[in-house]
Image: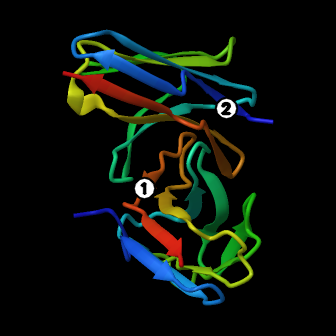
């Protein structure tokens, strides 16, 4: 049983396209995290949000607590956005992670 | 600069050998975590520690051991009892204060058993 489900698993886009990655979760949470993992393996935190929407540059994250769903959008995608995007939900003393969405943006 | 360091970046081990992965943080975080990442799977928690000299098993602790003698350090030993240790290992830390505990990750160690 996966507490966190992401879709799609893989995504290929042309440069400039608008991208949406979805995350659904089954546990009660106080906040949801979006992470980015680069090809070298390092992970950076993109967003931590508990309600509504957050924007950082070309990245937008939204969350609907009632529906237990979050989306990560990338506007005007660029090849440097190619990475694995992971959503994570904290519960108790642990985090549960989605399996990630592997994004490739083609020039 | 504040952050988390892991060493080595790549590690090769022969079957039957124990190996220790290093994780150090200078963020003054109370909590530290070890995760394992395999292709096609989400990060899975091996062990975590919220305070010095205390740690808890995660979902896949069998074949691993940890220690937390200092706040800054949380080394992970992969023992010969771990049947399939080849994987990417990530260390993370977070504060415990507040409601939303953002995790900060190290660069990872890729372990290969030969």
Asked if badges 2 and 1 are on one and the same chain, I answer no
In the picture, the disc for residue B105 is 1
Q: Chain of mark 1?
A: B
Q: Write down the quadrant of residue A96 in the picture.
A: top right
Q: Of helix, strand and loop, which one carries label 2?
A: strand
The residue lying at 66 percent from left, 64 percent from top is: B46
The residue lying at 28 percent from left, 13 percent from top is: A75
Q: Quadrant of the N terminus of chain A?
A: top right
Where is residue A50 shown, x and y percent of the image? 54, 25
Q: Is residue B27 left or right of residue A17?
A: right
Where is residue B56 shown, x and y percent of the image? 73, 68
Q: Quadrant of the C terminus of chain A?
A: top left
Where is residue B105 shown, x and y percent of the image? 42, 56
The residue lying at 42 percent from left, 53 percent from top is: B104
Q: Of helix, strand and loop, which one carries label 1?
A: strand
Q: Is residue B51 above or below residue B40?
A: below
Judging by the rendered image, the residue that carries numbered circle 2 is A4
């Amino acid at each position: 049983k996966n507490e966190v489900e992401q879709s799609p698993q893989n995504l290929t886009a042309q440069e400039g396209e608008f991208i949406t990655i979805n995350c659904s979760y089954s546990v009660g949470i106080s906040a949801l995290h979006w992470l980015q993992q680069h090809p070298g393996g390092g992970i950076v935190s993109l967003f931590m949000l508990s309600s509504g929407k957050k924007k950082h540059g070309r990245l937008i994250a939204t969350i609907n607590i009632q529906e237990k769903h979050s989306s990560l959008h990338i506007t005007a995608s660029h090849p440097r956005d190619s990475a694995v995007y992971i959503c994570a939900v904290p519960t108790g003393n642990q985090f549960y992670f989605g399996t990630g969405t592997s994004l490739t943006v083609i020039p | 600069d504040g952050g988390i360091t892991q060493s080595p970046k790549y590690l090769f081990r022969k079957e039957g050998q124990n190996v220790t992965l290093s994780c150090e943080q200078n963020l003054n975080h109370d909590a530290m975590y070890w995760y394992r990442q395999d292709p096609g799977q989400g990060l899975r928690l091996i062990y975590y520690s919220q305070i010095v000299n205390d740690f808890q098993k995660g979902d896949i602790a069998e074949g691993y051991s940890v220690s937390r003698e200092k706040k800054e350090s949380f080394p992970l030993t992969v023992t010969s009892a771990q049947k399939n240790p080849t994987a990417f290992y990530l260390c993370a830390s977070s504060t415990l204060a507040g409601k939303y505990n953002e995790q900060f990750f190290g660069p990872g160690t890729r372990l290969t058993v030969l």
